[in-house]
Amino acid sequence: MGVHREIVGFHQDDDGHWVADLECGHTRHVRHDPPWQEREWVVTPEGRAEWIGKSFECLKCGEDKD
């Protein structure tokens, strides 16, 4: 189980997949990969901009809590 952290930015990995940069310094892939993950917002600059400052689950911080 993860811990919610604020999104501070985005970047693309070496394969061109979008990655959220979290306030804790960790990252989280935010792929739009239907039907498994419906994240159409990640494919446009406007959509990503709307998510800056919103909370997203950090799985690494969740691991550190255990």
Image (cartoon, helix red, strand yellow):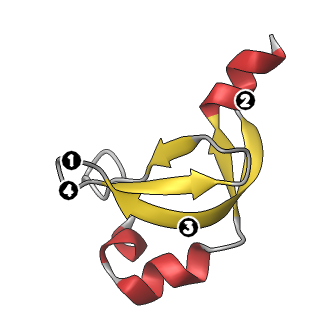
Between label 1 and label 2, give the one nearer the viewer: 1
Secondary structure under badge 4?
loop
Q: Which residue is mark 2?
A: 61
- Between residues 62 and 33, which one lies in front from this camera angle? 62
Residue 8 in sight: yes
Please give the name of the residue rendered at 39% of the width and 61% of the height, measured from the top-left corner: 11
Q: N-terminal of the two: label 3 or label 2?
A: 3
Q: Quadrant of residue 26?
A: top right
Give the residue type at disc 4: Gly
Q: Are marks 3 and 4 in contact (CB under 8 Å)?
A: no
- Between residues 50 and 35, which one lies in front from this camera angle? 50
Q: Quadrant of residue 64?
A: top right
Give the residue type at disc 2: Cys
Secondary structure under badge 2?
helix
Q: Are marks 1 and 4 in contact (CB under 8 Å)?
A: yes
Residue 16 place in picture, x, y as percent: 20, 56
CA distance for labels 3 and 1: 17 Å
CA distance for labels 1 and 2: 24 Å
CA distance for labels 2 and 4: 25 Å
Give the residue type at disc 3: Gly
56 lies left or right of 16: right
Q: Which of the labelled discs sits on residue 9, or is there none?
A: 3
Q: Which residue is mark 4?
A: 16
Q: N-terminal of the two: label 3 or label 1?
A: 3
Q: N-terminal of the two: label 1 or label 2?
A: 1
Question: Above or below — where is 14 with respect to 66?
Answer: below
Residue 25 place in picture, x, y as percent: 66, 44
Q: N-terminal of the two: label 2 or label 4?
A: 4
